[in-house]
Image: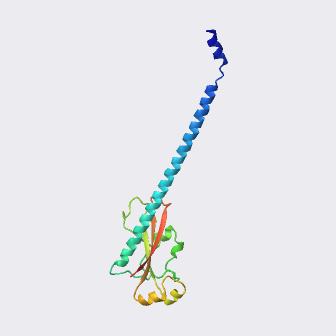
């Protein structure tokens, strides 16, 4: 009996201190893993949002190109919203697309019908501009050269620009294509 009392008096609680340190280490590891998974979840959400915006812009681009495939084209004088004359030439009718903000897109472009793309904040929008290609433009380094112009003299060139918004307004994608008719 006496031996048992002596060993109890000699203990100083080292196991308790080591146990608390181990518990602290496990807590730090747990918090770090929670933070990492939260970051990965936000990255996946942002990627999904960006993908939705890209798909919406692509739908707007295809919708505009389908308008150009129709038999009857609208007037490209600036009188119809979303259908503009050559944007490279100065005109007081519309702003330059490169400087457009959300309010410019709402006022100067065509919105796709409701529920064209689901899960997006706003439906995609597009604008079409009739591009005037001349021999002078070809000599200044445009993508159309003189030889191509001679072979395709009757072709009309159009630039379709589409803007898509993802699930939130933070994700925005603008796509552009050139359409020859």
Of 115 and 29, nearer the camera is: 29
Quarter of the C terminus within the rendering: bottom left
Of 90 and 140, nearer the camera is: 140
Q: Does 163 appear above or below 87?
A: above
**Image location (x, y in percent) of residue 104:** 49, 71
Q: How is the image coloured?
A: rainbow
**Image location (x, y in percent) of residue 105:** 47, 70
**Image location (x, y in percent) of residue 3:** 63, 11
Q: Residue at x 44, y 90 (%)?
A: 150
Q: Which residue is drawn at 36% across and 67% down?
A: 113
Q: Quadrant of residue 148?
A: bottom left
**Image location (x, y in percent) of residue 152:** 41, 87
Q: Does 106 appear above or below 37?
A: below
Q: In which quarter of the image is residue 99?
A: bottom right
Q: Residue at x 62, y 33 (%)?
A: 21
Give the residue at the far front of this rendering.
3
Q: Which residue is drawn at 41% across and 84% down?
A: 156
Q: Does 98 appear above or below 30?
A: below
| Count of residue discs | 0
Q: Is residue 25 found left or right of 85 in the rendered image?
A: right
Give the residue at the far top of this rendering.
1
Q: Does 150 appear above or below 93?
A: below
Of 40 and 46, nearer the camera is: 40
Quarter of the N terminus within the rendering: top right
């Amino acid at each position: 009996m006496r031996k048992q009392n002596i060993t109890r008096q000699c203990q100083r609680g080292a196991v308790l201190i080591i146990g608390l340190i181990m518990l602290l280490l496990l807590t730090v590891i747990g918090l770090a893993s929670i933070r990492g998974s939260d970051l990965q979840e936000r990255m996946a959400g942002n990627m999904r949002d960006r993908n939705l915006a890209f798909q919406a812009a692509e739908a707007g681009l295809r919708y505009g190109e389908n308008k150009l495939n129709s038999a009857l084209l609208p007037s490209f004088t600036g009188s119809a919203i979303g259908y503009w004359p050559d944007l490279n030439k100065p005109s007081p009718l519309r702003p330059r697309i490169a400087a457009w903000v959300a309010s410019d897109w709402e006022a100067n472009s065509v919105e796709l019908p409701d529920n064209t793309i689901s899960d997006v904040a706003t439906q995609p929008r597009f604008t079409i501009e009739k591009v005037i290609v001349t021999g002078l433009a070809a000599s200044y380094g445009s993508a159309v050269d003189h030889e191509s112009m001679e072979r395709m003299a009757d072709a009309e060139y159009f630039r379709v620009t589409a803007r898509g918004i993802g699930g939130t307004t933070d994700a925005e994608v603008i796509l552009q294509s050139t359409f020859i008719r």
